[in-house]
Image (cartoon, rainbow, N blue to C red):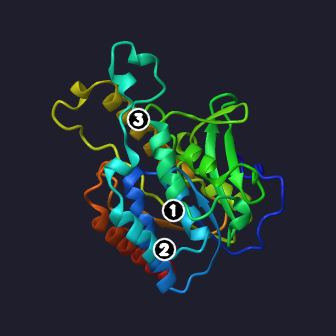
Amino acid sequence: MPESQNPFPVPAPVGGTVLVLGGGGMKGVAHIGVWKALQEAGIEVSAFIGTSIGSMMATGLASGWGWRELAELARKLTKEDIVAINRRAVLFGGVREEAVFRGDHFRAYLERTLPIQAFSELQAPLRLNAVSLVTGDEVWFGSGANEEVPVVDAVYASCAIPIYFPPARIGSDILVDGGVLHVLPVRQAAAWGAERIVAVDVGSEMTPPAEKYFERGMVAIHERVLTLNLQEQRKRCLDGWQGPPVVYIRPRIGHLGGWDFGRTQYFLEEGYRAAREALEAADAA
C-alpha cells in the first residue's frame, strides 16, 4: 500500500503505540508472552490491530483481558475446540465443498470464548482485517472502520483460512483470512496514526518439506503455497520503511506448524523471550 494511501475514513488515534498481532495459527499463542513482556516493560499500547489468530488475541486485549486470562485460555485450548472435519469434503464429490473443516464448529468456539459481542464494548481501539473474494480488497472491521458487524463475525472472517475454513458471508460480501493480503499490517498501523509500532510476526518459514510431505494431497500442497505467500509478505512489509519506529518481534517458532496444539507453553515462553530481546535492542539503539 502506498504510504500516502489511508484506508480508513476517520481520524487516527492521537499518537501512541499501536500493537500489531500477525497471523500464524496456534503459533499466535506467542502473542500472549509478548503482551506479558510489554506490560512488564511499562509500555502503554493505545490501539490494537489483529490478523487471523492475532485478531482473536487483539480482541481479548482490547477488551481488557490480561496475559493471565489469555494464557489460561490458551492452555485449555484443544484441537477439538477448533477443528471438526467437514465429512462431505472427504467423500466422493467433496471437491465442491468450501472447506475441509466445519465453520459452524469454529464459530461456536468463538461465540463462547470472545469477551465482547459488539465493538462498542471495547476498552481500547481495535481493528481487524479480512479479504473480500468479491472485490479482492482488504476489508477492515472495528474502531473507525465497520463497527456494526458483530465481533464474532469479524474475528471469524479474519481467521477463515482458505480451504481450511469456509469463507465468512457478511452482507453481500464473501470474506477470508486477512493474512491472504496482509499477515502483518504495519503500513495500516502507520496509516492509523501510530507514533510507534510493535509488530509481532508469528508466521511460518519455508523449511524443507518432510519425507512424503506432498503425498498428503491437496491440503498439504495448499499449505505449502500459503507458507510461500506469507514468507514473501514478511520480506516486503518493512522494505523501504519510512514510517514511525517499529519494534519488530519475531519469536523462533516459524519452523513449527500452525496446527501444533502440543507446544502451548513453548509458544508462550518464546513470545516472552523474543519480546524482551527486541525491547532491549530497541532501548539500546
Which numbered disc, 2 or 1, marks the residue closer to the eye? 1
Nearer-N-terminus badge (2/1): 2
Q: Secondary structure at mark 2?
A: helix
Q: Which mark is residue 35?
A: 2
Q: What is the three-letter code of the residue carrying label 2?
A: Trp
Q: Report the side of 182 relative to 243 (left or right).
A: left
* Residue sitting at the far right: 10
Estimate the spatial distance between the alpha carbons at disc 1 and disc 3, rounded to whole Å: 22 Å
Q: Position of residue 69 (x, y in %)?
A: 45, 74
Q: Are marks 2 and 1 in contact (CB under 8 Å)?
A: yes
Q: Secondary structure at mark 1?
A: helix
Residue of label 3: 101
Q: Position of residue 79 (x, y in %)?
A: 32, 49
58 vs 90, nearest the viewer: 90
User: Residue drawn at (56%, 51%), measured in percent from left and top?
Assistant: 237
Nearer-N-terminus badge (1/3): 1
Estimate the spatial distance between the alpha carbons at disc 2 and disc 3, rounded to whole Å: 30 Å
User: Residue drawn at (31%, 48%), measured in percent from left and top?
Assistant: 257
User: Where's the N terminus, which quadrant?
Assistant: top right
Q: What is the three-letter code of the residue carrying label 3?
A: Phe
User: Residue drawn at (45%, 42%), measured in percent from left and top?
Assistant: 105
Q: Secondary structure at mark 3?
A: loop
Is 255 located above or below residue 15 in the figure? above
Work out whether residue 68 can be spotted. yes
118 vs 55, nearest the viewer: 118
Residue of label 1: 57
Sort mark 3 into few (<14), some (14-19) or many (20+) by Cα contacts within 10 Å.
many
Nearer-N-terminus badge (2/3): 2
